[in-house]
Amino acid sequence: MEIRKTKIEDLERILQIYEDARAFMRENGNPTQWGETEPKPQRIRQDIADGDSYVCVDGGKVVGVFFFKVMEETNYAIIYDGAWKDDGSAYGVIHRIAADRIRHGVASFCIGWAFVQSGGHLRIDTHENNTVMQRVLKKNGFQYCGNIFVQDGTKRFAYELTQEMLSENEESEGSEGEEKKH
């Protein structure tokens, strides 16, 4: 698999991926995060024009799409019921991540790429009913930090991943493995 910037020629395929993702979300108890129409085509076109939309390509076929940018996300300025783990350094943001159902591991591959591009500091949010994405985030080392609210006023669970967190996870997994040997 590889990641590249999205081209306007990818739009039709991306819209198919998002349509399938909305159906998947409904089937898995999350009917309201993207409803029937999000993300809207004009939003995707703007992401492409701004150079912030990326696709994951496997065997010449687009299998995933996401927004990525190193930026200060205004929705992350205030966090409730918790705190960011690293509030002092620049971070990358992932939004609107979706993959087709055929190729497994696409979301994790995209997250891994974005982590490297961000310099080792990512933030992401997801709907409280999006248990599938919550599992993907935890599997990739993210820690739940609290709640944020997006422009439409709905609550999202906020997650963060830093190089330090990954190192701590690797160290604790290594210790557990060592303890099991003894």
Image: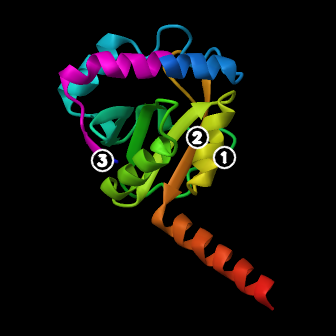
Would you say residue 4 sits in the magenta stretch?
A: yes
Gap between marks 2 and 3, in whole Å?
A: 27 Å
Q: Are marks 2 and 1 in contact (CB under 8 Å)?
A: yes
Would you say residue 157 sits in the magenta stretch?
A: no
Give the amino acid at mark 2: Ala
The disc at residue 132 is none
The disc at residue 158 is 2
Other-residue count near label 1 (Cα within 10 Å), few / some / many at <14 / 14–19 / ≥20: few
Mark nearer the viewer, 2 or 1: 2
Image quadrant holding the C terminus, namely bottom right
Residue underneath mark 3: 2
Residue underneath mark 1: 82
81, 140: nearer the viewer: 140
Other-residue count near label 3 (Cα within 10 Å), few / some / many at <14 / 14–19 / ≥20: some
In the rendered image, the vertical position of residue 133 relative to residue 123, given as above or below = above
Q: Residue at x 56, y 51 (%)?
A: 84
Q: Main secondary structure of the magenta part?
A: helix
Residue 3 point in image, percent of width and height: 29, 44
Say which quarter of the image contains residue 93: top left
Point out the stretch of residues depicted in magenta: 2-19
Work out whether mark 2 precedes mark 3 in sequence or the reverse, and give the earlier one: 3
Whether residue 22 is visible: yes
Q: Secondary structure at mark 2?
A: strand
166 left or right of 116 in image: right
Residue 178 point in image, percent of width and height: 72, 86
Work out whether mark 1 precedes mark 3 in sequence or the reverse, and give the earlier one: 3
